[in-house]
Amino acid sequence: RDFNERCAQCSEVNWGLTDGGRFYCRSCHNVTERTTEVVNTDFVCNSRIHTICKGLKNQEKTDGSCEWYVCEGFQLILKKQAEALEALGVCPQMKDEVLCNFWRRYLQKTKQAYCNTSAGETVKALPVCDSSTDVDSEPERPSPLQLLSLSESDGNLQTDSSFASSISKVSESTSVCSGSVDGSLYLMKNRKEKLRMTMPMTLSFCYMALLWLREPMTLSDLLRFVVEGHIPYLNVFQDFPEKMKLYGLDLKIFRVESWPVYEEVHKKMLELAAFLDLPRFPDITDSCFLHPDMLCMKYLMEANLPDELHNWTCRVVKKIRIGEVDFLTLVPGNKSTRNVKYDVLAAAVIVVVLKLLFLLDDHYEWLLSDFAEGRNKNNKEGGPYFEFEKWYKVIKCSLDRKQKKLDEERAKYLWRCEKVLFYSDKMKSKVLKRRQTVVNLQNQFGKLSGSVLPAEKPNPSSFQLSWSEENTDGSCFHGHSLKGVLQEKRGLLTAKNPDYWLCTVKLCNEKTCGHRAHYREVDFPQSYHFVIRLFSFLLRIQPSYIHDEVCVIEHKLFNKKLCKKPKYSTGLGK
Amino acid sequence: SSHEYKLNFKKSKEMCLSYIQDAMLQKQWKKAAEFLTFYMESLEKDFAREYLSPSEVIWRIGTEILCHHSHSSMKEFNSFTEQMKSLGVKRYLKVCLEHTFHLLCDGLIDEAYQNLSLSESWRSGDQTVIQDKEMKLIKAYRGLLDYYNWSKQKNILLEHGQDGFEDLSVEQEMHSCFRKAAVNLKEIIKIPGVWDLFVKCYVDLLEFYGDHNEARQVLNEYAYNSKFPTNPNAHVYLYQFLKRHGESKKSLVSALKILHDVVPSHELMIDFNIMLQKSKKRKRRRLGLEVIFAVLDYAGWKENVKAWSCLARQLKQIVISEKHLDWIKQEWNSRKDWWPAFHFSRYSAKRNWQENECLSHEKALVAGILLGKDCKYFKYVSHQGCKAQVKRFRILKKFVNKHNPVYLRVSG
């Protein structure tokens, strides 16, 4: 409308608007990236990013389905996830700016849109999937500021008009195998690519955006919300519009049959950040939620441990310098900086502090506890001393109960939703019939289940365990004092415990065996295992991952002593 | 125990299954039903052929739950089973067969019959070849139910006959049942196996219609065909048949002899011994002694008066005749080491005397002959008996005293 520039190809001024809101020249069908000023940058679900001209045939087939591409599907999913996160309290910037810009960049980098060489090119060159044909015409890498800007206009990019013809070719050959236009191509072409978009990767995107915005949500929180159903993931394709038919190979792409795995999502996030050539992420300072000091505070509360322990965690953090901005902030692609898992790190710090103060050798901590118990009985003034035994009993009881409940939930987990998916039309009637049988049987046995209330979705909460000091049964240990395990030496408070045992004498090389250390329950004291198990439950990760981190921290903490002499068992360098 | 925080479809269903199994073992049917509802969606992944497919698991577990759950009814069970039939072509006939069993257990004979008839007419491509065994069983059980119907008609007829009524339709019905039953029963017993019930029914039919030859042939086949597994009942049936038809002693003895070889402790051995004792043939009498000793080797016969009286009578008879003491010696040889403790302890003497005077009398006689008048058992019982002034014990005492030296010759 207001666009009066001459068309780059035919020098005419005859502009129209595509579905995607872009200007195209009516004379020569040249499409630009210039768009009308869009106030609301939300993704419209049936806009196709690489729509070219209005004259595209078969836009809507007779059976009410439309042509859609795999990445459109993922885009929809990301949108839904972002909305859910917003509902959980994440700032709207996440959805409107950060996530969609990351996504667009991804599309650009993987040549699915916004770029010179389109997916059409790669369709022709099918066996050889090298799509980096035009290095010269690669657009100037946008600066981070541009990335984050609201405007979509970027005049350097143009799409190839040959794309139009190749689309129909694609749809002819692939529409049989999948509802999406490029489903089979997607799987075939990108098999070797590490960063082919998958369902778990949507969570990598989300986490990356959360990290960029330094939102108070750790990866373990995010994944837990996914499993609890607060963030669309499991059967999110249900929310696809009617027109987007999902079948055949789409199932392999969009149907989820396992819970997302922490390590996998984290790893992909790092790869993604590097792939997208992102700059250094915003600084994680000591006022951020993800900073170990903050997270330790949170976990100490959740683990029902005395607030006083926070002093100690801060001391350890400071000593081994894991609270520093440069250590904590993600710099994509920098291999020398360790991949920091904020939640695991904080949990491990707490474990180390517990080891420092209580030794946790299945002996000393109980001695200390007896001492504190004796004192508490005789002396009621000045608040109770922290008794390890009491804490252990309270936590064990809660933990066992929660664990049992979790195990039942795992057994009762339902993977299928109302929307039925099938691989081909041949299978359709079989699948539908089978579904009907399942529903009938569920009803029949459901009636025999007695008056069992349907499991309510728990309200999303950052804290899984909560303890209140108002409880008169003394089951809250936040206010308890550590005096029972401390002593004063030269005006400083130090631990009574003079010893420390290292979890491992030598750290493994992660590249060779995938871990820094190896954890077997039988090799370690029960108290240690208990503490690891507690945090393992809270974070929903394998105990070995926390153990790994504990080992690394210990080696940092006792670095000097480790380097000096071969034998190390005593002394604390605090 | 290490807890995994990963989960996939397969693993979660495995966990679900273990919860179901736990609940069932503890007879918590409501809980089992609850978890089974969550397990159901594994059917949607059933198209792969696994060793134990979800549909089979659900069929078996669902059946158990429905049988035991207090709120379940036959109607529910039927509807469930119909769904199970439609789930797997490969298992169709097996489900039908087990459905029939459940119906029969519930006394729903007619429904069972209908079910079997329906199953018989089921065809599905090449599945009939694979499910050949089940089909044969289905036909056999239908034959059995036909027999049952035949039997009902027969009884009606007999009643009416007594009352002087004649009922042509019932008679025709009866004959038709017979024909149907005979065909199927005959078929199944051809296959080597244990078909006791089918054989009995078939023989019953044959006998009623006077086809004794066929009946005898069937029973002989069943008892003597080496392809069939060893089955004591086969010999019992044969023996009973022969007895019914007044067959020769020889055939009766040969039938029971095999039974003695296979199951020496069988209850028919008492009859066998009685039959053999009476025989004029020495060999048979000898066999009789062997048979009765063998019976009393088994703990189940320890306190059986009849068995002891048989042995006592035969021993007494031999002792009096003073012939064939070596028979006793032969039989006693392998038993003299353990029978005294097994049968003739002082403790058993006391108990037998207190609980069963007749038993103690018979046993005392045997003990006296085999172990002499000074053995614990005889001494105690005879003393008690005489003290109680029971006449027969005095006679007993006299007898044993008289023939005391026998035991020396017998124990050799």
Image: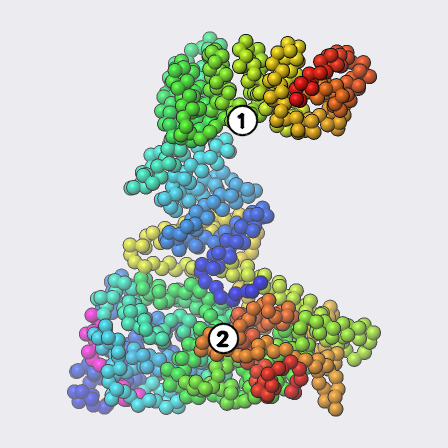
State which quarter of the image contains the C terminus of chain A.
Answer: bottom right
State the image coordinates of residue B179 (x, y, percent, origin top left): 36, 21
In the picture, measured across the screen, residue A536 lies left or right of residue A124, that is right
**Viewer-proximal residue among A422 and A124:** A124
State the image coordinates of residue B251 (x, y, percent, origin top left): 46, 15
Q: Residues within 10 Å of mark 1 (few under 14, many from 20)?
A: some
In the picture, measured across the screen, residue A213 lies left or right of residue A44, that is right
Q: Amino acid at mark 1?
A: Val
Image point (18%, 87%), residue name: A9
> A161 above or below B311?
below
Q: How is the image coloured?
A: rainbow
Q: Marks 2 and 1: in contact by CB < 8 Å?
A: no
Res A369 visible: no
| Residue matched to label 1 | B263
Q: Residues within 10 Å of mark 2 (few under 14, many from 20)?
A: some
Determine the image quadrant of residue B214.
top left
> A317 above or below B187?
below
**Viewer-proximal residue among A262 and A211:** A262
Mark 1: which secondary structure? Answer: loop
State the image coordinates of residue A339 (x, y, percent, origin top left): 48, 81
**Viewer-proximal residue among A510 and B393:** B393
Res B337 visible: yes
State the image coordinates of residue A399 (x, y, percent, origin top left): 62, 66
Magenta part of the protein: which range? A154-169
Q: CA distance from mark 1 to mark 2?
A: 67 Å
| Residue matched to label 2 | A515
Image point (64%, 68%), residue name: A526
State which quarter of the image contains the N terminus of chain A.
Answer: bottom left
